[in-house]
Amino acid sequence: MGKILIVDDEKNVLSSFKKVFSQEGHTIVAAGNAEEGLSCAQKDAFDLLIMDIRMPGISGLEAFSRFKEIDSKMPIIIMTAYGTTETAIEAMQKGAFDYVLKPFEVLKMKELIEKALAASRIMKTEVSFDTNEQADGERIIGFSSPMQEIYKTIGQVASSDVTVFLRGESGTGKELIARAIYSHSNRKNKPFLVINSAAIPETLLESELFGYEKGAFTDARERRIGKLEQCNGGTIFLDEIGDMPVSIQTKILRVLEDKSFERLGGNKTITVDVRLITATNKNLETLIKEGKFREDLYYRLNVVTVKLPPLRERKDDIPQLVEYFLNKYNKELKKEFAKMSPEALAILEQYDWPGNVRELENVIKKALLFAKGNVLLSENILLQEKTPEKQKGQVAHLQELLAGLVKKGLASRSSGLYKDVIEEVERTLILETLKQVNGNQSEAVKILGISRPTLKDKIDKFGLRKVISLQES
């Protein structure tokens, strides 16, 4: 829920907002003109401002600029009559979150308010890797070597304007890293917007990013400013860029090369100063071969790449992560769990975490919700079991691996394809088995049905000691 300031000279609008949105759990403060609204903003902090662009006294754009001076990270939604949309569009170009025409639909306004409040939380919540538990904001957790390397990279690139490319499995914390880069950048007082390419239909994604001109398509009744133009001077996090259609990739490439684009249906070149942080959990190299991702865009993105390790490769961080999530959800759920039992922690450390840190967080939250007493026990830890669907997925993954190896062999016209495929399958089988048993070689030989010396020979042959911690017993 958020604290919202409404500024409008129409009393019925103010009363309607108070009535409708107070019921949603928001705190509503109403002001009848810009001067009164500015006075409220100077005295108190707000999560969102909704203001009419045309009121007696201070002009709408001047009021907008003064509100931005008071709090540059407070999203502002503009309300306007149809005849003043050009002014609202100008406010959008200056950084307004969005604008709505009066009279507006309550349901659409609710959706817009939720989006604006989410953006406000993201911009105003600092992300750090401070070890101080009392530090404000959110923290990236982990003392492991892979995480230390990530901290160094953030420190090196945050203050520059270089494009950063985040790669890693789902749930590894790519958005948190993007927010950390933003929090420590020279643009931290400018807008920060998150756009998930996979969550927006292709037909809407292009207009969302680049905007459109009146008449560009059937429902384009007036000009619309896109997120790139709206975020001028700020930072945009393009998540799941591997799911972006090739046609839009072409326009993103141009933005990276010369910081320009055209709105849909327009021929005027728009120039913007926006820093892009991108992320994907897809194998872009494979997508390039399939013609689904532009190779030139790949090289433009790949200047500074941060690879986020899956949780199974940094299990030393699990105790610290558990402590962090226990503290977080003790406060949120008003619980008083002092600690986790050694047996429960051992279960978490032995699990493979296909959903990574996000899955661990959900497991801890669920355990706190249903547990009794003040210690989390092993029976409180509910992990996903392997379902037939997951097993089918693993078989499909193996088939995909084999198909890729065969294609590679055919393309290179190399001899010895059978030997190469068998070796790669054998390596994958041994590596995945060792991961499942947390590196326990005794367990692995039982499952694989081979001798201990044979397993050791295979481990050395495939160089697996470098990628997994091994146990002798």
Image: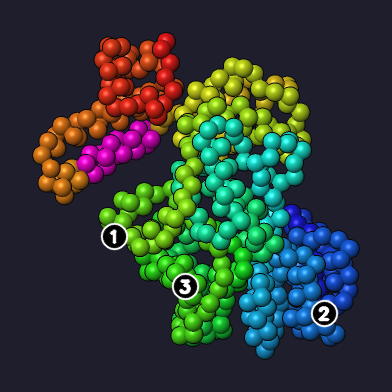
Give the labeled residue for mark 1.
291
Q: Is residue 443 above or below residue 47?
A: above
State whether residue 218 appears in this view.
Answer: no
Q: Which mark is residue 103?
A: none
Query: Dot 3 lies on which element?
Result: helix
User: In this rendering, would 306 be left or right of 447?
Assistant: right
Query: Dot 2 lies on which element?
Result: loop
Outermost residue to the bottom: 83
Badge 2 density bin: few <14, some 14–19, many ≥20, Cα 10 Å: few
Image position, residue 62 (x, y; %): 77, 80
Nearer to us of marks 2 and 3 is 3
Q: Quadrant of residue 90?
A: bottom right
Q: Quadrant of residue 236?
A: bottom right
Query: Reading the chain from its start, which is encountered first: label 2 or label 3?
Result: 2
Tell me the quadrant of the picture where the C terminus can be found.
top left
**Residue visible at 36% across and 52% down?**
284
Give the labeled residue for mark 3.
258
Nearer to us of marks 3 and 1 is 3
Q: Is residue 105 above or below residue 122?
A: below
Give the labeled residue for mark 2.
10
Q: Is residue 142 above or below residue 193?
A: above
State whether residue 456 appears in this view.
Answer: yes
- Asked whether 430 or 332 is in front, the reply is 430
The majority secondary structure of the magenta stretch comes to helix
Image position, residue 469 (x, y; %): 44, 23
| Gap in angstroms between the C-alphas marked 2 and 1 | 55 Å
Question: Which segment did they paint magenta?
Answer: 388-405
Badge 1 density bin: few <14, some 14–19, many ≥20, Cα 10 Å: few
Nearer to us of marks 2 and 1 is 1
Image position, residue 429 (x, y; %): 30, 27
| Gap in angstroms between the C-alphas marked 2 and 3 | 45 Å
Badge 3 density bin: few <14, some 14–19, many ≥20, Cα 10 Å: few
